[in-house]
Amino acid sequence: MFKIDLKLLEDELLTRLSAAESNFLGDNMLVEKLETTKHTAAEIEMKVLESKVNEVKINEAREHYRPVAVRASLLYFIMNDLNKINPMYQFSLKAFNIVFHKAVEQAEACEDVKGRVNILIDSVTFSTFNYISRGLFERDKLTFAAQLTFQLLLMNKEIDVRELDFLLRFNIDHSYISPLDFLSNSAWSAIKVMSFTDEFRGLDQDIEGSPKRWRKLIESECPEKERFPQEWKGKSSLQKLIMMRALRPDRMTYALRNFVEEKLGVKYTEGRKTDFAKSFRESGPASPPVFFILSPGVDPLKDVESLGRKLGFTIDLGKLHNVSLGQGQETVAEIAMKKASEEGHWVILQNIHLVARWLGALEKLLERCCKDSHPDYRVFMSAEPAPSPQGHIIPQGILENAIKITNEPPTGMHANVHAALDNFDQEILDQCSREQEFKTILFSLCYFHACVAERRKFGPQGWNRKYPFNTGDLTISVNVLYNYLEANAQVPWEDLRYLFGEIMYGGHITDDWDRRLCRTYLEEYMNPNQFDRKLALAPGFVVPSNLDYQGYHNFIDEMLPRESPVHYGLHPNAEIEFLTVTSDKLFHILLEMQSPDAVMGEGASQTLEEKVKSVLDEVLERLPEQYNMADITSKTAERSPYILVCFQECERMNILTCEIRRSLKELDLGLKGELAMSSEMEKLQTALFFDNVPDTWTKLAYPSTYSLGIWFNDVMQRCKELDSWTQDLSLPSVVWLSGLFNPQSFLTAVMQSLARKNEWPLDKVNLTVDVTKKFKEEFNQPAREGAYVYGLYMEGARWDTQTGVITEARLKELTPTMPVISVRAVPNDRQETRNIYECPLYKTKIRGPTYVWTFNLKTKERPAKWVLAGVALLLSV
């Protein structure tokens, strides 16, 4: 500014001087201008010196506040990465700016600069945390809190990047056998691998040396709250997390929550629900809409309607427009939005995910309606998240600026039974002339509804596929119950069970095994015993007799046992499995959220390219040569079903190893700079870096849940098995069924060979299985009839070798190994049908699409017990 003034004065002076005549001293105006310029120049010089001093002071003061800016930028980039978890989690810089400025305004004043900076950092961090958490599903809140904690600790150099990388990857060589009965083989393998590092050297010896102390820790109900024995209690919090992941992976979500609480404070783990009225105050006519991310069984728009009633925005007053999209409602929505923006009404747009083609127009309409709109105008939207990132359709422009809110159904059987009962009232209970029967069956239906809805949390052991059971299924079932009881003198049990299990709830179900489960639940929970108080829905929880509406709620509070998998008919191990899978997924997501530069940051021994190159070289070095099909097929002229299976397996393995070799050589050339990196090569590089099996390999391989290291070892093991089979093409004494690409083809070959031998028609034959009392090593020749197979595991129960029946699983023994099974074919009319459990066989724990066969296993218990327990055989764990 000063320089501009000086320049203007100088220009004016020069103009006058050039225009002056010979005696310019006589020009009074010019002389005055000279004087003024001289004074001004002196003043400006003084002010320039002052401004330089001020600039230094301002810069110094500004530097004090730099930590706040650094924290804010870190928060923004963490926020920006959340769409890797779910594409619904999109946030813009503009929205973050608003949150940041509000946090600065709301921060407490403080005279001390250092104190003020700390208050600002805390305020900005917690405000951003709350703003983001409000729009995250419950399962992702801990992931976000942990990512925030790890990134802050890395930035402050409080944790070692290599230790964090080890915790997240947890690459373990599973070849060690545990010498201690309280430690599983996988836990012992993890301990052995850790013992090779400096930080954990001697851990294996200490555990073997004082097993009593370690047993107490490992078998504790909450080991994350216990102190580690000996000098291990002095390890850092992150090192304790690593040890806990090795010893009790099922408790890692709790241990991680404690870690976040220790480092950031208890307010980051409390998980309070944000009041909707508070979120509403953040919205405005020109600001983005409120966006509800839907969950099955929840109607978040009730909050909007109840707040609308308080503030005078209701449908009756014409100030609330509720549009459920789909079936040509787009025009109705457009008219409602234009009217609302002019007159200051509220608009609810439900299920916008149903109108994919209109979403682009909606985005533009939102922008237009915001301009010059009435101060009371508000828009509320709702949409379901897509089942996969590829199916995501909501435009980024709508999502990133919106105030996102998630509402999820209550968790746990206690809350779910109450919520189911809340759909009715005393009037509904009293409406039926056959009061006791109606009330008792209605109560059983509420428990059944809570059970099938909450069982989803146990993953594939709960249901093979996820189903959107909702309150509509329950209320319609109760209407059907009322009509049938009024119309029949006797309770039509068969009809009711069919209507509920095959139509109302069964209408959602697409998997035959899930349909069997639903049918079994209804047979257990709906039968004449319930009228005599003889039917226990859960241990100690008998169906109550004739109570009033409040009486049923009180009965649930007083009598329902504390939350346990037993409520659903599952074994307590189901919870251990569910928690282990949850924590493994959480760590995998956290690993993928770390930028490769951060993971390979200071202190790391390798760069990204070096790490990928070392994995690539190791795989190429160990990859076996392809099978020479001409040589193998020429070994025999016989083409029996078993030999054809062997040929098919070799061909499948050749296709897979050929693709592995081709893609890795191509990537190697790309890393050397001899080939341009394509998007396929980049995907392969990312997969190798994060220890994932690349998609192009998975398509040609077999279903698997393993990480890359374990998966490749598994491929090598399969090659070894094929090598021995192709030596002379005679059937191995015991076949590793899990090691086949297509186990169905081998089981079919068993049927074909026996049907040919005995001249039975193939369509009248089925497989029968006898579980032997021996393991693989005890066999040295093949079965005389059929085949011996091994490599199977049981989930949900265990096989009792002594009595030869399915029996209750042992605690913490999640997937016990099955003995060798003799598989042979018999005509259908000779099949054993009594005391049999039809047990599905799957390739992996994912179950569902990996179904292989049904094996009939002997049981002394009722088969219904094993159906509810989700008992299945698996080929790989």
Image: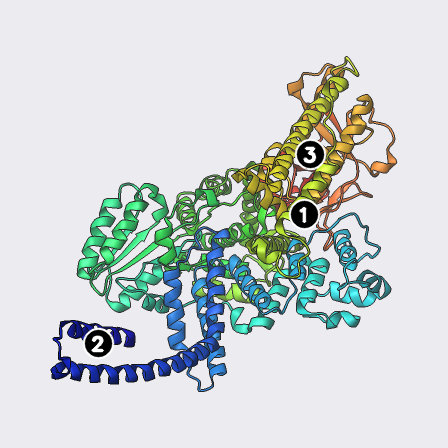
Residue that badge 2 annotates: 9
Cβ atoms under marks 3 and 2 closer than 8 Å: no
Q: What kind of residue is marked 3?
A: Phe
Q: Residue 736 carries which label?
A: none
Q: Is residue 490 visible in the rendered structure shown here?
A: no
Q: Is residue 523 above or below residue 307?
A: above
Using residue 799 as the reference point, say whether residue 589 is left or right of it.
Answer: left
| Disc 3 versus disc 2: nearer the observer | 2
What is the C-alpha distance between the residues marked 1 and 3?
15 Å
Which residue in the structure is indicated by mark 1?
A: 796
| Of callouts 1 and 3, the N-terminal one | 1
Of residues 624 and 605, the one drawn nearer to the viewer in this rendering: 605
Reply above or below: 788 against 459. above
Q: Quadrant of residue 343?
A: bottom left
Quick one: 431 or 339, which is closer to the camera? 339
Instruction: Name the element at disc 3.
Output: strand
Q: What element carries label 2?
A: helix
At which x and y percent is residue 58? 41, 79
The reply to whether residue 355 is visible in this rendering is yes
Q: Name the residue under label 3.
A: 855
Q: Which amino acid does label 2 sit on?
A: Leu
Image spot of residue 154 (x, y percent) = 59, 65
* Residue displayed at 69% across by 29% down: 653
Alpha-carbon neighbours of circle 1 within 10 Å: few (<14), some, or many (≥20)?
A: many
Rendered location of residue 199, percent (x, y): 75, 64
